[in-house]
Structure formats: C-alpha cells, structure tokens
Image (tube, helix red, strand yellow):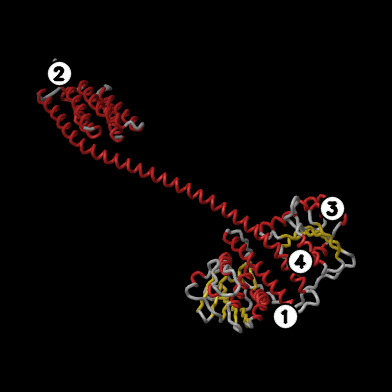
Amino acid sequence: MYLLGILLAGAGVAIFIANYLFSGGAVRPGSILALLTGATTLLLVRAGRVRLASLILGVGLVVAAWAGAYATMGLYSVSFVAVPLATMSSGWLLGRKQAFGVAALGIAAIVSIYAIHQMGYSFAGVHPLETILVVLVAATLLSLLIGSETAVTFQHQLREIQDAHAELGRHRDQLEALVLARTQELSTAKVQAEKANLYKSEFLTSMSHELRTPLNAIIGFTELLELEDGMTESQRQDLREVSKAGYHLLRLVNDILDLSKIETGRIDLSIEPVELEPLVAECRSLVQPLADARRIQLHMQVDDPLAVLADSTRLRQVLINLLSNAVKYNNESGFVSLRARRLDADGAVRIAVRDNGMGIPAAVQPQIFEPFQRGAAEGTKIEGTGIGLAITRRLIQQMHGDIGFESSEGSGSEFWITLPWAESACAEPMEDGAEVPERPASSETERVVLCVDDNPTNLKLITQILRKRERLKVFMADTAEAGITLAKAHRPDLILLDINMPRMDGYQMLEQLRREPALSSTPVAAVTASAMRADIERGKAAGFADYITKPLDMDDFLGKVDALLQER
C-alpha cells in the first residue's frame, strides 16, 4: 500500500514534468490529481488509516483518469488505463463491494466522456467512438471480475493473517504476563533469600557470641586448674578431657562460621608466596600430640626449596585438617605421610597426605566434599563435624588450586591438593631447639590493669589469669559507667574492655575515655566474644589497641597483655 502511494505520487510528478516540458508549459489536471492522490495515500498509510488510504487510491485513480481524458483525447486518452487498475486494486485491498463501487464510478466516467463526444466536443481520434467505449467498459468489467474474485482469496488470506497476528498477540500477552509473573517471583525469592541470609548472619553472629562466652569460662578455668598444685593425675586427666571438649566445641563454632563466610563470599585471602618447609613443620608440631596419642607415625617430605602462591593462614588450616583427618580415621599404630613436590608438567605444586587407615566406602565418595558428610566415620564414635573437607575444598578453590582424593575401603586414603608454584625465597627453616621468646622481665613498678565486663565469670577468669604476672594490680568493673569512674580514680596502665554491655557498650566507653585528657593515651584492648571479621575490623577502626577474642588462650592472652604494658 505504501509502495503504491509512492509509485502513484512519482508517476504524477513525472507526468507533470513531461507535460510541462513537452507541451509548451501546459499543466495537466490529471497529473496533479495523481500526485495529490499518491501523497494523500502515503500520509494516510503513515497515520495507520490503511482502509481509507485504499479507498482514496481507487477513487483518486478514476478521478485522475477522467480529468486527464477530459483535458486531452477523451475516450482515446491513455489515462483510462487507470480505471481497470483502480478496480482491481480496490478489490484486492477493500473487497468485492468496494471493487463494484470503483468499477461503477469508472464506467460512469467513461460514459460521461462518451456523452461529451456525442455532444460535439472535438477530440482527436482515429477509431470509432463506439468501439473505444465497448473496449473501455469491457476492460473495466473484466478488471471488476478479476478484482472481485481475487478479493475473495485476498480477503481470506488477510483474515488468516489477521487471525495469526491476533494469535501472536495473545501469545505475546501471555508471555509478557508470564515473564512479569516470573520476574515478580524471582524478585520475591531474591528478597526472601536476602532476608534469610541476613537472618542467618545475625543468627551466626549471635550464636558465636553466646557460645564463646561460656566457652571462655570452661576453657579458661580448666587451664588455670591444670596449673594448680596438689592435683592427682586422674584429676588432671579429667581436666584435660574438659579442655578437649571445650576446644572441640570451639572448632565446631569456627568451622561453621568459616563455611558461612566462604559460601557468602565474605572471606578475605592474602595470596602471596608461602614457603612450604616451615609451614609443614609447624603443622606437624600441632598434629603430633594427636598422632602420639594413637601411636601413629608421621612422615613429612618437602622438596627443598619449595613455595606456593597461597594464603598462609588458610593453607595452614587446610594442611592441619587433612593431617588431623588422616590421624583420626586411621588405625592404631598406623602411619601418615605428607609429600610436597613440584609437578614438571604444569609447574604446579602437589601436596599429598596418605594414610593406611579405614578408607572411604565407594558409596559415600561422591559426597565426601559436601557439608556434614563424614565418609567412613559415619556412625562411629570418632569426633567430627563433617564440614572440614567442605571448607578445605572451598579454600583451595579460592586460592586457585585443586583438590582430590583416592581411597580404597580398608586400605587407606590419599588426599591431594595442587596450588600454583611460587619462586622460593630460600628462607632458612627454624632450627630444632630454637629459643622461644620469654615473657618480659617484671617491672619494678607495679602496673595497674582495669578489667570491664558485665559477666562476673569473665571478670573472675581474667583476674585469675592476670595473677600469673607479678607486680600487677587489677581493678574490676561490671558496667561501663563504673569502669570510667575507676579509670579516672586509678589511671590504669591498661584497660581490658568487653564490647557487649548494657546501657553503654565498649565503643561508647572508649569514646568517653578518649575525651578525658588524663586517659586519652591509655591503651584500651577489646576482650570480647564478638569474633566475626566485621566485628574485628570495626574494633580496629574504632581505635582499640588490640582486639582479643574469647575464649581466651591463656598464653596468647598474657603475651598480648605484656606487649601492651611494655608499649606503655
């Protein structure tokens, strides 16, 4: 339709120019009408009025033909060719009824010109008028027949196209509704997942704090009791069992927190070259007591020098977990070996831990790296949470490494990890018997330490631990307000401050202490069960001299207290 409008307008312009150039400047009304008809058709099509444009096209062709015939040669004019074209196009575009209308209009135009001929108006011509009249009318009727018949087929096809278009429209609407519904569902699910993740984080933070607080008392007082004189060996063994259970629960809390941080992408790694020989030696010393208890031999072999690109803290955690598993799930008097070597094929470093223990049943091997899967230990009395290997795999993957295993039930297992090779700095390993730094010599001046904690058990524990240091005077406060009062009165050399306290928390107390000129430079260390990474970062940013998490390791705690007092 749009194309017909362009053709008609173009023909009108061409005829107009031809008439002007070759007819002595004469202007023909037929060419002007053809131009106007084509332009009007174009405008109506662009406006979406296709049916009206079709009607204008058919009628406009007939009127332009009549005007052209009247202005030139009457029935002999070639412009009457437009009448059959108008009739057929009307049938195709508008249907049979409109084709009859345009045909009637065209025949009326032909007859009117014939009447003008009969009234004596002079037109140039060479054929009898009656013959021309019959030919034109016959051509119009034939075009009517063709146009009306093809109109049926065309209209049927048009209806099919319209029906298909309507069906597509319905499908489009359904798809849009489905997409909208799915989008809303995804949005709702995303919000729910974010809420669930927030609730989980809040729950883990709360549980971490609530579990660490009693563990601090359990582990701390147990270690203090072990140092007391006059205890029987049986009593000391009982205390060691209590301490062992406390540390087991602490590892469980730490493992769950680690797994949560890894799954949510909130674990930070510092990837750098790590020398394997000293790291493996350190891991061996930590696992050796567990191996000695079960009479298991440990064999370590590291190609020297050898280094990998990894986070040293997390790699230590991975190796300790693999070695501990190899010892725990081994037979009495068995062996565990660790071999670290560089793979020539791709330059990676492979660390393999092998044991000759119970092995892993084939049925559970595919799930061995999934959380809470314990493999061969399932249903046994061997302690474990089933999340150590899940954490290990995720840590290795985040350090751009790989992990795998081979196991045969009853014959033992070999777990291996690969990590990117790093150029060794050839650091000399620590020699056996190297001296461990001793605690600082006691100062001749008595030092004052203020402990602020709303939990009386924690205050008692910290006080008893600090008594292991000579010439140390300890003041205690169970509220921040009381702590500020004592700090003003005694000007302590060190303040140990809990974070979560009622009315005024540790951060608010620290802020008030910094406003006091006499206390603004006093070191303040946080001693808290809030051990999440975000808590630690917030504490350091707030200006605490140190951030010590519960449960307290007595030696580590005293070492930090000594360091803070020496700085003072």
Q: Is residue 73 visible?
A: no
Is label 1 in a helix, a strand or a loop?
loop
Displayed quadrant of residue 165 = top left
Q: Is residue 55 above or below residue 259?
A: above
Disc 1 from disc 3: Cα separation: 50 Å
Residue 11 lies, in percent from the top left, at 27, 31
Specify the amino acid type for callout 1: Asp
Specify the amino acid type for callout 3: Thr
Neighbor class of circle 2 (other Cα within 10 Å; few <14, some 14-19, many 20+) is: few
Is label 3 in a helix, a strand or a loop?
helix
Residue 557, label in figure: 4
Give the quarter of the figure containing the N terminus: top left
Neighbor class of circle 4 (other Cα within 10 Å; few <14, some 14-19, many 20+) is: some
Looking at the image, do the residues carrying marks 2 and 1 touch, with CB atoms under 8 Å apart?
no
Mark 1, residue position: 432
Neighbor class of circle 1 (other Cα within 10 Å; few <14, some 14-19, many 20+) is: few
Furthest residue in direction top, as rendered:
119
Residue 473 lies, in percent from the top left, at 86, 63
Residue 115, label in figure: 2
Give the quarter of the figure containing the C terminus: bottom right
Count of number-bearing discs: 4
Is label 4 in a helix, a strand or a loop?
helix
Disc 4 from disc 1: Cα separation: 26 Å
Neighbor class of circle 3 (other Cα within 10 Å; few <14, some 14-19, many 20+) is: few
Mark 3, residue position: 485
Q: Is residue 325 visible?
A: yes
